[in-house]
Image (spheres, rainbow, N blue to C red):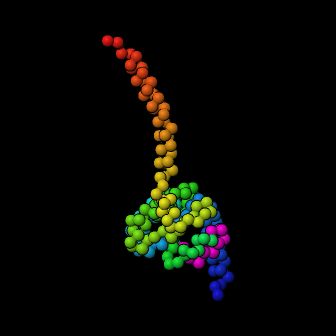
C-alpha cells in the first residue's frame, strides 16, 4: 500500500490530467513504441510549435482521469505504451501531426490508438481522417478565394466592356 503522500500525489496527478482532458478541444492517444530519440525530439518540437501538449502517460492514471472527465470510451485502448497529445485551441493539429507521423513510421510500431474531440470519442480511423482535413488557415484561404471569385469575375467582365467601348470602330 502506497504512503499517504504518494497516494495524494497520484490523486492530484489524476485530477490534473482529468482537467486537462476536459479543457482540451481535442486529443489523440498513440502507441509510441519503436520511436527513436531523434524522431521523438523532432515530433515533440513539431507538436510544441503547433501548441499541442504531448506526454507519455501511465495507462492506469489515464484510465482514472478519462473516467473522471467523462471520456470512458478511451479506456478500451489503454494497453501497452501510451502517449497523449492534447490541444486547447486547435482541434485538428494533434491528429494531423501524429497521423502523418504514424503514416510515415507505422511499420516501426508507432500507431494511433484513439482520440477525442468536444467530448466525443474517435476511433483510430476517424482520427486519421480528421488529420487529413485542411488546416484552419487553409480552409480560411479557400473560403476567401470562393468569396473573391465572383467579384474578380465581375471586375474582369466590366474591364472587358470598358476596353471594348474605348476601341475606335473601324
Name the spot of residue 95 as percent of width and height, x first: 50, 61
13 falls in the magenta region: no
Name the spot of residue 127 as percent of width and height, x first: 51, 63
**Of residues 114 and 18, the one drawn nearer to the viewer in this rendering:** 114
Point out the image quarter for the N terminus: bottom right
| Res. 16 in view | no
**Of residues 57 and 150, the one drawn nearer to the viewer in this rendering:** 150
Instruction: Give the residues in magenta.
Output: 57-71
**145 left or right, relative to 13:** left
Count of numbered circles on the image: 0
| Res. 156 in view | yes
**Which corner quadrant of the image does residue 46 belong to?**
bottom left
Point out the image quarter for the C terminus: top left
**22 left or right, relative to 51:** right
Name the spot of residue 77 as percent of width and height, x first: 54, 74
* Residue at 57% over, 55% down: 89
**Of residues 153 and 19, the one drawn nearer to the viewer in this rendering:** 153
66 falls in the magenta region: yes
**Residue farthest along the left direction in this orientation:** 170
**Which corner quadrant of the image does residue 66 belong to?**
bottom right
**82 left or right, relative to 108:** right
Name the spot of residue 65 as percent of width and height, x first: 63, 72
**Which corner quadrant of the image does residue 119 belong to?**
bottom right
* Residue at 41% over, 65% down: 103
* Residue at 43% over, 71% down: 110
* Residue at 42% over, 24% down: 159
Amino acid at each position: 500500500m502506497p504512503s499517504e503522500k504518494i497516494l495524494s500525489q497520484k490523486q492530484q496527478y489524476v485530477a490534473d490530467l482529468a482537467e486537462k482532458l476536459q479543457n482540451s478541444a481535442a486529443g489523440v492517444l498513440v502507441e509510441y513504441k519503436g520511436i527513436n530519440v531523434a524522431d521523438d525530439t523532432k515530433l515533440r518540437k513539431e507538436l510544441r510549435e503547433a501548441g499541442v501538449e504531448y506526454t507519455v502517460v501511465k495507462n492506469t492514471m489515464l484510465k482514472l482521469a478519462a473516467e473522471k472527465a467523462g471520456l470512458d470510451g478511451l479506456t478500451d485502448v489503454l494497453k501497452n505504451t501510451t502517449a497523449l497529445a492534447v490541444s486547447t485551441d486547435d482541434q485538428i493539429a494533434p491528429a494531423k501531426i501524429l497521423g502523418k507521423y504514424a503514416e510515415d513510421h507505422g511499420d516501426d510500431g508507432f500507431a494511433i490508438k484513439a482520440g477525442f474531440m468536444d467530448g466525443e470519442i474517435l476511433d483510430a480511423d476517424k482520427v486519421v481522417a480528421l488529420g487529413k482535413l485542411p488546416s484552419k488557415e487553409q480552409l480560411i484561404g479557400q473560403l476567401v478565394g470562393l468569396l473573391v471569385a465572383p467579384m474578380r469575375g465581375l471586375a474582369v467582365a466590366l474591364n472587358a466592356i470598358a476596353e471594348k467601348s474605348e476601341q475606335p470602330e473601324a
